[in-house]
Image (cartoon, coloured by chain):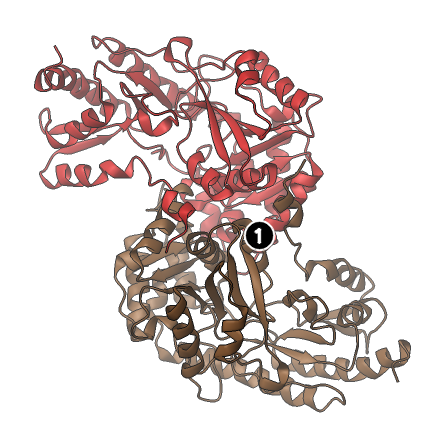
Chain colours: A red, B brown
Amino acid sequence: MVSSRGQRMPPSPIRKLAPFAEAAKARGVHVYHLNIGQPDLPTPEPMRRRLAEIRDVTYAYTPSAGTAAYVDFLKLYYRRLGVELSADQLLATTGGSEAIQFAFLACAEAGDHALLVEPFYTNYRSFATIAGVELVPLVTRGEDGFHLPPRDAWEKARTERTRMVVLCNPNNPTGTVYRREELLAVAEFCRDHGLFLVSDEVYREFVYDGRTVTSALSLEGFSELVVVVDSLSKRYSACGIRLGCLATRNPGVYQACLHMAQGRLSPPGLAQAIAPAAAALGPEYVQGVVTEYQKRRDVLFEGLTRIPGVFLRKPEGAFYFVARLPVDDAEDFAQWLLTDFSLDGKTVMVAPAPGFYATSGLGHDEVRIAYVLEEGDLRESVRVLSAALPAYRKARRLD
Amino acid sequence: MVSSRGQRMPPSPIRKLAPFAEAAKARGVHVYHLNIGQPDLPTPEPMRRRLAEIRDVTYAYTPSAGTAAYVDFLKLYYRRLGVELSADQLLATTGGSEAIQFAFLACAEAGDHALLVEPFYTNYRSFATIAGVELVPLVTRGEDGFHLPPRDAWEKARTERTRMVVLCNPNNPTGTVYRREELLAVAEFCRDHGLFLVSDEVYREFVYDGRTVTSALSLEGFSELVVVVDSLSKRYSACGIRLGCLATRNPGVYQACLHMAQGRLSPPGLAQAIAPAAAALGPEYVQGVVTEYQKRRDVLFEGLTRIPGVFLRKPEGAFYFVARLPVDDAEDFAQWLLTDFSLDGKTVMVAPAPGFYATSGLGHDEVRIAYVLEEGDLRESVRVLSAALPAYRKARRLD
């Protein structure tokens, strides 16, 4: 019989809707995918050119911790952020995913608890299930822009088995960017109780309206407790190469993760070969990407907030947000969009928010929306949603 | 504090010697690496050509279970072996490593036992530690060519917590190829007790002297219990691309592993893009590789068995074997080779066998030798070892 953890492994909540999207497409309906975080922008040209220049005759294992060239690239990347890290504080990983998995395994025993805020990145659930770690959620609310709860909420949620806090900053799914003092308050809470602070910063560059984001690695006095997980996926629009890193100044955590890395031999070699080419990208690369996403955010924010009953605070970063809709069952609405609705042969696919909450019943009137489509498609998506919501309310007799 | 499993994660036993090898090289000594399984043969030209043809503008996520093209390639590969598998029985993984990890997690609970024979592939220890699974070893011996123990030995080793048997066939580190009836006996043992049979077949093509190897997938009547882990690494001399698969006809195991795969999003995309090009390789590709490795095996086998006190049965497959040497501390000998010995400015690096045993004290007079070097280098390695062994015995006063 399959192990109980195997049976408990959560299926992707977004996958559930995939057959309905396929069926809609088969009927000739165009589906705008607001449900996934796959950037549509090109992978930077220097990385693609580097791929064409690979002349290796044997695609050999790389060092378990990453090639010298990739680790040097990471050092340079962090130095440009003002964060000095040495080679033995940077571990190459197979995407941010593996970095999160390693962090969970190294920072907590099976049976231990991890505190985090909900809604949260749904795949933390998978990594926690594998590690046997219980996710203990603190609610954040749209009215507060999903900002972090005050210290006493963390204190109340802590148990004897709490070993770590997991933050995602800028946040997937809410698009919230935590202020330095918010982050500092959580770091102090962690320090006072001997907890690790695992900070998922894969959307680091994606901050809008002139904001800056504080990396947990730049907080002074918290070296021993901070474990940052990072990825090239979003930053360089290169999700498929599966390359990221774990960065920590805690030698024990580093060594445990390095030993896990030795067990799986090495991270992807072709990805490591092309990644260092990104060092040639100047600040204008990130500026261009941020300008593009900010424009997209504005289109969606302005469009959606004009729809009666839709509520969201202006998203601050990443390329997602969680919006409250005038529905009482977001899963039903998301499915209905695919099965029962189209406007001029078009519909939209959104991610129902309940999959991003651990607490049952939360998020029933919310959806996560990703803006990784071109501006014109986003405008059209707003038009579709503007027509769909009243039609859905009528169909379900919500008025 | 780092979790106890993090602290227990075994470092690579081969890594321990790496600094001594570096120091030897820094002294100008040439080190023949008989310690690692990194094939030196070229990655097949069609795969390398395909890499040069990649024109993707965005390196995007692939489906979690693998691209249609890669899964189709796997189906074709297995069909050519006489094994029919459907797309929902084949899961693309990040190397064979991830397939092994998924299998451990899906087939056993934390605290359960896995039976396997020792010596065994050392990294099973890492995957077992992550899964919280206890490895329970049955000893195999060089005198028996490291073939499998009889049924009663498996019965005796089984406990209430035994959930699975792990086999590696052809075997790393011993080079043993299990006969069909050996494999069948283990499969029957598994069936009779409701255990999973996890069969690591990454060296499937590497069998010598006209042998054939039986895939566990080709045993009739055991569909529900067989989980095969596989990799392109050795077959196509492409270890660095990190691409493999898990193959099982058990829908529950498949689904659990698919959900784990969804958690980590996707396997490496560039690897999946080039892998299908290997479908163009005819049987002459494998024949050529096997002929080359068999020649290398012969050079080493004939050379080493002529050294007084060295014992090994003729290796049957893979590109490793475990040899008994006239030493009483293989770890000391392996280190001494790097620190104290050279012949004409050359020495060899071998993997001490104790790292491949779970039972303390076993393998103290054995080493694992890999033959992934050219014939001339292997002849020279034999000459070095022939001179080194008497010198070591003299230095350590073993005579």
Does residue A124 appear to the left or right of A198 in the view shown?
A: left
Q: Residue at x 46, y 50 (%)?
A: A51
Q: Nearer the viewer, residue B111 or A386?
A: B111
Foreground of the two, A311 or B42: A311
Residue B125 percent location from the top left of the image: 59, 58
Name the quadrant of the C terminus of chain A: top left
> Tag 1: residue type?
Thr
**Quarter of the view holding residue A379:** top left
Residue B143 % position (x, y): 63, 86
> A307 or B147, which is in the foreground?
B147
> Residue B231's x, y, as percent?
44, 63
- Identify which residue is drawn at 28% across, 71% down: B79
Element type at marker 1?
Answer: helix
Note whether residue B27 is visible.
Answer: yes
Query: Which chain letter goes with mark 1?
Result: B
* Residue sitting at x 23%, y 36%: A17
Residue A107 occupies which quadrant of the picture?
top right
Q: Position of residue A43 (x, y in %)?
A: 41, 38
* Residue A205 located left or right of residue A72: left
Which part of the image, by quadrant, shows the N terminus of chain A? Answer: bottom left
Residue name at image x 54 percent, y 41 percent:
A110
Residue A79 against residue B388 in the figure, above or below: above
Residue A238 seen in the current view: no
Q: Residues within 10 Å of mark 1 (few under 14, many from 20)?
A: many
Residue A226, relative to residue B232: is it above or below? above
Quarter-of-image position of residue B50: bottom left
Q: Which residue is mark 1?
A: B129
Q: Is residue A72 above or below residue A282?
A: below
All told, the count of numbered labels is 1
